[in-house]
Image: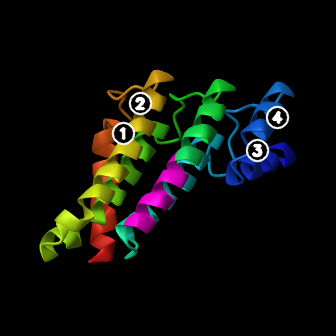
Amino acid sequence: MEKLQELIAAIENCDTEKISYLAKNGMDMNCTDASGCTPLFFAIRKFGGMISSVSFEKNSNKKQTAALNEIAKKATAVISALLENGADAGYEDSDGCTALGLLKFFWQLGMLAFLPSVAEGVIARKKEVMQLVSKIFHDMTLILIEAGADENHTNKFGETPAKYAGRIMTGEMEKRM
C-alpha cells in the first residue's frame, strides 16, 4: 500500500522519473486501490478532471489555452510513462469499464462547459478553447488506443466506452439541473 501511495504521489506531481523508478523496482502498474482504481484510472481522473474544470472557468481564452496546454503536456507525459512501464490500457474495473470509457466521460464533461456559450451566442469567442479541449482528449484517446485500448470493448452492461460515458454524462447533467 505504501508503494501505491508513492506511485499516486508521483502521478500527482507529474514525476515520470519516479513512475519509471517504481516500475523498475517491482511496482505493479496495474495494482488497485480500495475502490478498484488503477494508477492509469487515477491519472485519467486527475487530468480529465483538471481539463474539464478549466473548460468551465470564465477566464480569457488566452489563460484557458495556456492552462490547458500545460495540463495536456503533463497528462501525456504521465499517461505515457504509466503505459510504457506496464499499465494495461485494457484493464477493466469491477463494472468492466476501461480507462478509455473514463476518458470519454471526461471528454463529454469538458464539452458540456461550452453549452451555455452556444445558448448565449458567444461560441465564436470560445471556439479556440473548445477545439483545444477536444484535441487534448482526442490525443489522449489515441495514446490509449495505441497502447491496446479497444473502442468496441463492452462493459458488463453491454456498453462501449462512448455509450458508458454518455450514460454517466446524462446522470451528471441531471444533477446539474
User: In the image, is residue 51 above or below residue 145?
Assistant: below
Residue type at mark 4: give it. Answer: Leu
Cβ–Cβ below 8 Å for labels 3 and 1? no
**Mark 4 / mark 2, whichever is N-terminal:** 4
The percent coordinates of residue 154 (x first, y second) are: 35, 31
Residue to which mark 2 is pinned: 142
Q: CA–CA distance between discs 3 and 2?
A: 24 Å
**Mark 3 / mark 1, whichever is N-terminal:** 3
Residue type at mark 1: give it. Answer: His
Residue to which mark 3 is pinned: 7
Q: Which residues are magenta?
A: 62-72
The residue mark sitting in front, 4 or 2, is: 2
Q: Secondary structure at mark 4?
A: helix
The percent coordinates of residue 24 (x first, y second) are: 82, 25
**Mark 3 / mark 2, whichever is N-terminal:** 3
Taking 124 as reference, is 74 left or right? right
Camera-nearest residue between 18 and 7: 18
The percent coordinates of residue 111 (x first, y second) are: 29, 58
Q: CA–CA distance between discs 3 and 1?
A: 26 Å
Residue type at mark 2: give it. Answer: Leu
Taking 9 as reference, is 62 left or right? left
